[in-house]
């Protein structure tokens, strides 16, 4: 069946450094790739997303890149801050009409002050 | 944080009991979803619904049931057949086919 592999499972960085989280998906028909941030005990919230017709998207300190050929997409956080500490989930969605999200297993990011 | 609500926030169940978790949204979204999250784990899909009166099983539907009688509501019943129901349950909704999912605040279910 479809799956999404996410790495690493935990990541510790010094404040101000960059963090990169990588996901690989199996269904080549997937066409929407969101990233969610979940703080402890809270609900997941969308931080950035990308569609299959775009290779890169940036929003301030956060960027996502997509390589459809390799079925691979990545989250990049620059100038990390303590409030970036959370669990991050990637997902692959589609094909169109299925409404089904396939989530990665999550990455726990710790930003050390 | 408004738009999709879940109740109760905490729920305690005795073994052998059925319990129902509420999920309501006022976002006019067609699609609604239920996920289970265990400590330190990802999101596993229990059931999802694309339209009223229609729903599909997700990856871990055994021991759970749902209904979708109204667009705004998608309650989840955890039955006594679910052997290990202690978990954090998240409801979500989305507009259209491939769009952002909005999550509710979650219900933490504990079996006593």
Image (spheres, coloured by chain):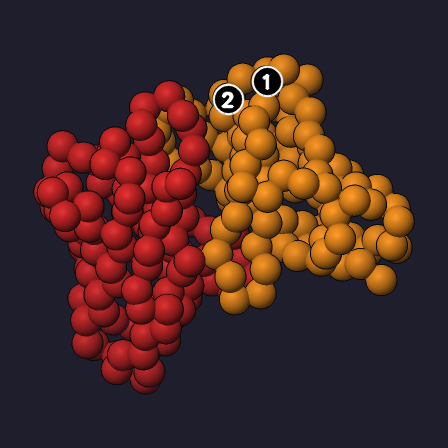
Chain colours: A red, B orange
Q: Residue at x 12, y 37 (%)?
A: A54
Of residues A16 and B92, the one drawn nearer to the viewer in this rendering = B92
Q: Could you say which quadrant of the image residue A79 lies in?
A: bottom left
Position of residue B2 relative to residue B50, above or below, is below
Res. B3 visible in picture:
no
Q: Which chain letter goes with mark 1? A: B
Marks 1, 2 in one chain? yes
Of residues B25 and A13, the one drawn nearer to the viewer in this rendering = A13
Q: Quadrant of the C terminus of chain B?
A: bottom right
What's the distance in space between the residues labelled 1 and 2, CA to CA?
7 Å
Of residues A75 and A47, the one drawn nearer to the viewer in this rendering = A75
Q: Could you say which quadrant of the image residue B68 lies in?
A: top right
Q: Residue at x 75, y 53 (%)?
A: B83
Q: In the picture provided, is B80 more to the left or to the right than A17?
A: right
Judging by the rendered image, the residue that carries numbered circle 1 is: B54
Q: Residue at x 56, y 27 (%)?
A: B56
Q: Which mark is residue B50?
A: 2
Q: Which mark is residue B9?
A: none
Label 2: element kind: loop
Residue B60: x and y in percent read 59, 43
């Amino acid at each position: 069946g479809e799956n999404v592999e996410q790495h690493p499972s935990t990541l510790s960085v010094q404040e101000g450094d960059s963090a990169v989280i990588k996901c690989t998906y199996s269904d080549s028909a997937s066409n929407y790739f969101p990233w969610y941030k979940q703080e402890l005990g809270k609900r997941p919230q969308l931080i950035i997303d990308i569609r299959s017709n775009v290779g890169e998207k940036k929003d301030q300190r956060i960027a996502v890149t997509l390589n459809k050929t390799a079925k691979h997409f990545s989250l990049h956080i620059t100038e990390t801050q303590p409030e970036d500490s959370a669990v991050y989930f990637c997902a692959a969605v589609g094909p169109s009409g299925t409404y089904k999200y396939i989530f990665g297993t999550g990455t726990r990011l710790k930003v050390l002050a | 944080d408004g738009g999709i609500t879940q109740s109760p926030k905490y729920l305690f169940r005795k073994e052998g009991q059925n319990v129902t978790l509420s999920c309501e949204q006022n976002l006019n979204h067609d699609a609604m979803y239920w996920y289970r999250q265990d400590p330190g784990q990802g999101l596993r899909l229990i059931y999802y619904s694309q339209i009223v009166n229609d729903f599909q099983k997700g990856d871990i539907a055994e021991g759970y049931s749902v209904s979708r009688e109204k667009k705004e509501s998608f309650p989840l019943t955890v039955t006594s057949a679910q052997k290990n129901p202690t978990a954090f349950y998240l409801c979500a909704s989305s507009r259209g086919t491939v769009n952002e999912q909005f999550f509710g605040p979650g219900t933490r279910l504990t079996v006593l």
